[in-house]
Amino acid sequence: MIRVLIVDDEALIRSGFTHILGTAEDIEVVDAVSGGDAFDRIVALRPDVVLLDIRMADVDGLTILRRMRELSRPPAVAALTTFGTDEYVDAALRLGAAGYLLKDTKPTHLIHQVRALVTEGSALSGQVTRSIVAKYLDAARAPEPDPRLERLTDRERDILVLLAEGRSNGEISAELFLGVGTVKDHVSSIFAKLEVSNRVQAALIAERSALLDPDRPS
């Protein structure tokens, strides 16, 4: 059972998301609160996933993200926003959010993305991954190869490229003819060697280091 905490200052959003996620047999919404109560509820309930509005009137989502960095085992966080061009998305990803979701996300997609936060470590499709990295995270700068990439094996580098394109572990497994368990082991090794905690942060390193081929189909 995936335990989810919803944080939003709009009661309608909290109610709607609770209802949608409640239709999934493997998801339990443990609470839905506004920003002021969020951190205490996260500590008390220890959810697996937090859907976090990054623009709230009382306590904004970025403040909550900073506080969550104090936790020994923070939950996976997807930043909620009304617009895909929200400038706060950049800061949220840098603070450790594993992705972002638009508030008008289709119900079935919302459920899928919550599951992806747990199974894949991110809530971004391939297309969204590339657009976020390109638009928000210094894509205009000249490529700067990260020295940590030298720690990766050739196989790990191949997997990093596919991961950065938004591929799931299952899709990487099929493309490289590897077992899903083997892919998971490689992904864990990549995170350790790159000193990152999730797929989005790994994707940023790949993008900034010009590992992604712009002509490669996603």
Image (cartoon, grey):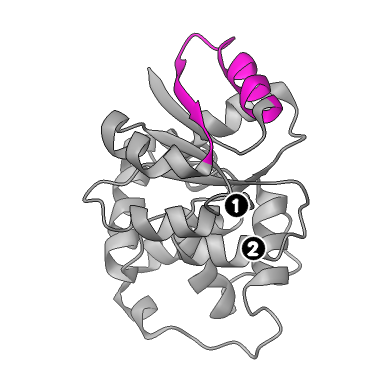
Task: Using the rendered view, name the quadrant where residue 193 is placed.
Answer: bottom left
Q: Amino acid at mark 2?
A: Tyr
Q: Which residues are magenta?
A: 12-34
**What residue lies at 41% left-to-right and 54% top-to-bottom?**
198
Tag 1 secondary structure: loop
Residue 164, horizontal then vertical, whole percent: 55, 59
Q: Is residue 18 magenta?
A: yes
Please state if 152 lies on the left or on the right of 57 as rendered.
Answer: left
Instruction: State whether residue 112 appears in this view.
Output: yes
Tell me the SS state at disc 2: helix
**In this figure, which residue is indicated by the disc labeled 1?**
54
At horizontal 49% and vertical 8% (from top left) the residue drawn is 25
Residue appearing at x 38%, y 77% in the figure? 149
Residue wearing tag 2: 88
x then y, percent, for residue 60: 55, 54
- Residue 173: percent from left, percent from top: 46, 41
Spatial separation of the CA atoms under disc 1 and disc 2: 7 Å
Mark 1 or mark 2, earlier in chain: 1
Give how far across and how far down residue 141 sits, in percent. Answer: 66, 88
194 w.r.t. 179: above or below: below
Q: Amino acid at mark 1?
A: Ile
Circle 1 crowding by C-alpha within 10 Å: few under 14, some 14–19, many from 20: many
Which is nearer the eye, 27 or 32? Answer: 32
**Image quadrant containing the N terminus:** top left
**From where the camera sits, is residue 161 visible?**
no
* Mark 1 vs 2: CB contact within 8 A: yes
Residue positioned 29% across, 47% down in the render: 185
Side (left or right) of 97 relative to 42? right
Q: Is residue 169 above or below residue 22?
A: below
10 Å crowding of disc 2: few (<14), some (14-19), many (20+): some
